[in-house]
Amino acid sequence: MQSFFAILKDSFREAVDGFVIYVMLGLSSVVILVVASMSFMPAEPGPALEAIVQRFSLTFPDKGRSRVISASFENRYAATEVKPEGDGYRLRLKVTANGSRANEPDKPPQGDSFRRTVAAWLKQPGRTVKMSDLAGKQQQSGPGGSGSPPPEIEFSLNQEATLDEQRAVTNADMEEFLRHQFAIHAGLTATVQRLPADEPQYEFDVTTSGGSAVRGWPHTMKMFFGTVTVSEDVNLGTVLWIIEDQIINGVGGAVALLIGLIITAFFIPNMLRKGSIDLLLCKPIGRAQLLIYKYIGGLTFVFLITSFTVGGIWLAIGLRSGHWDLRFLAVIPLLTFTFAIVYAVSTLVAVVTRSPIAAMIVSIGFMLFLYIVGQVKTIFDRLRLEERSDTMPAWVFTLVDALNNWLPRYKDLDKLTSKLIADGTLTEAERRTFGLASIEYPSWESTIAVTLAFIALMLALACVRMVRRDY
Amino acid sequence: MSIIETHNLTKTYGRIEALKGVSLRVEKGQIYGLLGQNGAGKTTLIKILLGLVRLTEGAATLLGQPAGTVGVRRRVGYLPEDHQFPHYHTAYSLMDFYGSLYGVPASVRRRKIPETLELVGIAGRMHSKIKTYSKGMKQRLGIAQALMHDPELIILDEPTDGVDPMGRKEIRELMATLKQSGHTIFLNSHLLGEVEMICDRVAILQRGQLVREGTIAELTQQKGLYVLRLAEGQSFPVEAVTQRGYTVRSLAEPPGAVEIAMSDGQTIDPVIQLLVERGLSLRHLVEQKQTLEDVFMKTVEAAEPGVDRQRRRGAARPVGGGN
C-alpha cells in the first residue's frame, strides 16, 4: 500500500503543478460563492398555500398513477383562514366549481366541474395527445437531461366523466384527491375533511404538516447576498434542481470531464518518457501495478476536484436553503465513474503512443462518440415506443442496440444521475410535467456492469502492452 | 556467489543484434567498469539486468536471483543515463517518493533523505524544485536516489555526466567509500581516465560483443617497451643495441632518452649488461605502460576498423538503447 499511496501523492503533485488546476478550482470557488450568495425566503403561509392550491388544476388520472397530465381550469381553488397549527398550518380550502345548475336538497348531485375532475382522477385517462404531436413533431430541447430530445409527455384530452360517475364521487374521494394534490404539487402531508357547502361550492378543512420545509413551497429567491431579487414565487425544489442538475451535473460535469481529461492525459505519457520510465521501472514495483496505480491517481484527482465542487455546492445549498439532500452527493462518485470510462481509453492510447495529445484527442473523441450513441439510442427507443420503427431498416436498430449494449453507458449514467437529483429536489408533479417521469431509465446494475467490463478491458490491454514492451 | 553474472546474453531488436553472447561476472565489493562506443550495447546490458528490457537468449543473474525480478530490484540502486526527473518535485519529495517505492519506512526516509543528499552535496537545495537545478545537481540527485535505500549493488550509467571536475572528484571519492563499505558498483562511463582511476575490473563491449575483460593492470600492461636514459654527457650505443635485435627510437622528452622495443622472447637484461660493460651510467629505466584510453582505442579499432565513422553516417540504433 505504501507504493500505492506514493503514486497517488505523486499524481496529485503532478496535477497541482500546472495552472489549469488553479483555474478550475477558481471557477469552482466562484460557482460555490454564487450559490452561497443565494437566499431563499419562504413565502408567508397565506400566499404560499394560495399559490400551491392554484397548481391543483393539473391532475394525474388513475389516482395519480398515470403519467398522463390532465388539466382542468374550470375549478377555482382558494386557500383561506390560514393559521399555524402544530408543525404546519390549518386552512379552509374553497373550491368553486363550474356547474350547470345548483343541486336540490335530498336529490342526487347534478354534476359539476369539480366532481368531473375528481371522477376523472379516479379512473384511467381517456384519449391522449403527445407533446410532440402538439408541437407539430418539432424536436425541442427539453428538461429531460442535458440537451437530450424532449421527453414524450402525454396530455389527456377532454377527459370526461358521466353524470353517474360524477354522482358516484364520495366525500372520501374528494378528500383523497385533495390530499394527493397537496402531496404531488408541494410535497405536503395533509389531512382533509369536507365541510358542508352547497354544490357547486365545496369547502374543506385542511391541516398540513411540515410547514414551509417542503420542496414545493414558494420562496423568494435573491442572489448576491440579497442585492438582486430573482423571483418572488419560485419553488425551492425547482431552483435546486436547476442548480444541481442543469448547472452542476450538466454543464459543470462536462467541463470537469474535459479539463480532467486534459490534465490527466499527461500523467502516463510523462511517466513513460525516456529517462523517466527507467527511474520507475527499476524500482521494486510491477509494471501493471504501476500503470493501474497511475490510473487510479488520475481518478483520485478528478474525485477530489469533483468533491470540492459538489461538496461545496451541497454545503452552500444546505446552509442557505436548509435542504440537505444526500442524493446530490452521489454526483461525486458517478462523475468520477464516468471519467473512469474515458480515462481508461486515454490510458490505453497513452501506453501505445506515449503521446498526451493523442491520448487527449482519442479520449475526447470517444466521449463524443458515446454521447452520440446515447442520443441515437434514445431517439430509436422512442421510434420503437411509437411503433414507428419501420421508418428505418431493422439492421440500423440492431447496430444501435449492439453499440449501446457493448459500449460503456456514458449516457445512461447521466440519465440515472439526473434522476437521482430530480428525485431529491422536484415535486412529483414537476417531475411529470418536466417529462422526467416519462423517461425509460436503464438499470443501475447493467449500466455499472457493462461500464466496469469496458474499463477492465481497456486497462487489461494497456497493461499487456506495458508489460511486454522494452523500455 | 557473484553479484552479477551473465551467460551468453543475447538481445536482438528485429534484425539488429544489440548484444551477442555476452558473458561476464562481477564479484562482491568490486567497482566494475563497462566501456564501449555509442551503440555498443552497454545500456542494453544494464537494462536487461534491471528488467527494463527482456533478453532474447542466455541468462543473467543479479545477487543470485534472475535479473529484473521485483525482489532483485529492491536490492539494486540505479542511475540511468539521460534521466529526467519529474520537474514538479523537489529533491526531498522525489527521494521521499522513490524511497516509498523501495518500501523504506517513513521514519527512515526522514532521516536518510537529508543524509544522502548531504553525501552528494545538494542538501542545501533539497527543498527547491528540481527544474531549478543545474545538470550537475540533477546528476548528484540521481546518485543520491540510487543510494538512499542502501542497495547491495549500485548501477551507475554515466554518473559524472555534466558534473564539474571538483564534483567528479567527489563522486569518485564517494564510490571509493561505498566500495570500502562492501557495496558493489557497476559503472558505465565514457570517461576512461576516471574508469582507470576507480575501477577494479573493466569490460569493453564492441557492437554487442565482449572484446576485452580484465583488471586495469592486466589491460594496461604493455610488454617489451622500455624508456631508458643515461647520465648527462653520455651517448646511448644505438648501433650496438640494434645489432642485438632491439629497436631503438630517440625521444624528444626527456632529453637524451630512448625507447627500446623488444621482440618476443627478448628481455631488457642484455641491454643493461652492455651498458655496464661499456661503463655507461644508467639514470632512468621504466617499463612503458599504456593508458586505458590507449587500450580502448586499440581494442575498438582492432575489433572493427572505422566503426565510429559508419555510426556517424546514421547506422540504426537499437530501440531502448541509449548507448
Image (cartoon, grey):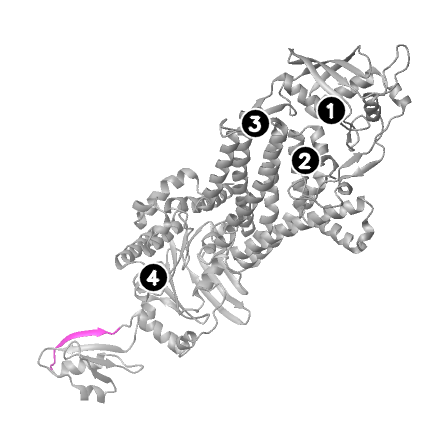
User: Residue A42 is drawn in which quadrant?
Assistant: top right
Cα distance between the residues tagged 2 and 4:
71 Å
Question: Same chain for marks 2 and 1?
Answer: yes
Q: Nearer the viewer, mark 2 or mark 4?
A: 2
Q: Which residue is mark 1?
A: A56
x, y percentage for residue A184? 72, 25
Q: Nearer the viewer, mark 1 or mark 4?
A: 1
Amino acid type of the residue tagged 4 in the rendering? Cys
Which range of residues does the magenta coloring cover? B279-288
- Say which chain tag 2 marks: A
Which residue is identified by label 4?
A: B199
Q: Residues within 10 Å of mark 4 (few under 14, many from 20)?
A: many
Foreground disc of the pair 3, 4:
3
Q: Looking at the image, which residue is at 35% across and 53% down?
A: B138
Q: Taking B84 as reference, is A433 left or right?
A: right
Q: Position of residue B246 (x, y in %)?
A: 24, 85
Instruction: Say whether mark 4 and mark 2 are on the same chain.
Output: no
Quick check: B28 above or below A332?
below
Which mark sits nearer the N-terminus, 2 or 1? Answer: 1
Q: Chain of mark 1?
A: A
Q: Is residue B287 magenta?
A: yes
Q: What secondary structure is found at the residue carrying circle 3?
A: strand
Distance between the alpha carbons at the discs numbered 3 and 4: 80 Å
Earlier sequence position, callout 3 versus callout 1: 1
Instruction: Determine the chain carrying the residue at label 4.
Output: B
* Residue A84 placement, left or right of B79: right
The kind of secondary structure element at disc 2 is helix
Q: Quadrant of residue A206?
A: top right
Which label sits in the foreground, 2 or 3?
3
Name the residue nearer the viewer: B294 or B84.
Answer: B84
The reply to whether callout 3 and callout 1 are in contact (CB within 8 Å) is no
Residue beneath label 2, please? A419
